[in-house]
Image (cartoon, rainbow, N blue to C red):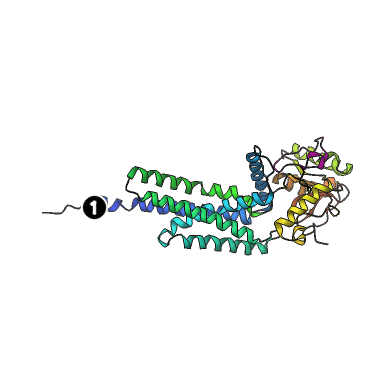
Amino acid sequence: MTTTHHPDRLRTSPAPDVARSGLLVLVGVAVLLALGLVTFGPAGFVADARRTVLAGVEALAAPWPGSVRRAQVEAVANGLLFVPVGALAALVLRRFGPVLPVALGAATSVLIELAQTALPGRVPDVVDVAANTAGTVVGVVLTTVGLAAARRPRRAGARRARRGLRTALVAAPLVVVAGVAGCSSVGPAASGPDGGPVTVEDGYVADGEELSAFADVPAITNLDSALRTAVQDAARDATADGVDFHVSTGWRSAAYQQELFDAAVSEYGSPEAARVWVLRPEESSHVTGDAVDIGPTEAMYWLSRHGSDYGLCQTYGNEIWHFELAVERGGQCPAPAADPTAG
């Protein structure tokens, strides 16, 4: 008998493997780029994304009693951040079992935390490493289960498993971006230092809320009158330039400021580390009505360029959203301090 060979089949059979390898490379690059962006990206981008994520979490939690706590949101976000990392590592390293992908995810988190020590305003935290590692484990488990299902003899089930796995990989970069809140602090918990609710009367503005500079609420009306006028003038001109301009937070009560400071101490581990981002009530210019935080990112940069026309200056280098009335209109703004603890 003569054996018949089919050269065309031999040539085309590797194509599916090549396609899968190409998809893995593309997804891997996308995940790494997204992870780098949300970890080391511009402070303005991180701040805006953080507000969006927290607003979504608060909306989801609204039907349940109680409030969403800062630490809870951050832990979930850190976990989500590394789910696609674990899934991708488990897929690429599937021949080595689950231990190596988990170790790789944990090592990546440690390296990121160490690298953040060189960035202004970033505070490494061992809790972040634990949350990232937990997310890696989830990703590894999901991929391992998916691969096991794909090996089953039922072809239809295997095809469905492979389709689900490909869908998860394509969605992985989106999950990474959704986890951006894990890269930095999130907004305030909606409760006061005595466990009672913080209200609008305390100057509370929910993260993600776009508060008009002309709003009739204490966060605006309790500002120093000269500051309020300057901000409102800037808001009019920014809007005329086509820039979306709103106030993220303005005046705060001492009780509200104390709640923010206590939450920051819990988050960063010490009062000294917390003061880089949140001052005590007796130190805060928000409590005296002498400071506003501006959003979104486009408005922050617009005001950093034009703020001196209104006497408004960026006060801290690590908070591009924080402005105070520091000079006469048309004056020269001083260089911002590195952070609230400087000087």
Q: Residue at x 80, y 60 (%)?
A: 341
Nearer-the-camera pick, 88 or 120: 88
Q: Is residue 19 left or right of residue 140?
A: left
Asked if residue 216 lies in the magenta stretch, the reply is yes
Q: Is 44 placed above or below 222 here?
A: below
Q: Position of residue 80 (x, y in %)?
A: 57, 50
Q: Residue at x 53, y 52 (%)?
A: 83
Looking at the rendered image, the quarter that the C terminus falls into is bottom right
Q: Position of residue 6 (x, y in %)?
A: 22, 51
Q: Position of residue 286 (x, y in %)?
A: 83, 48
Nearer-the-camera pick, 335 or 332: 335
Nearer-the-camera pick, 242 or 9: 9
Q: Is residue 158 left or right of residue 257?
A: left
Q: Amino acid at mark 1?
A: Pro
Magenta residue span: 196-218
Predominant secondary structure, magenta span: loop
Residue 318: tell me if it is visible: no
Q: Is 170 placed above or below 105 here?
A: above
**Mark 1 secondary-structure assignment:** helix
Q: What residue is shown with label 1?
A: 7
Residue 318, quarter of picture: bottom right
Seen from this angle, which residue lies furthest left?
1
Q: Residues within 10 Å of mark 1 (few under 14, many from 20)?
A: few
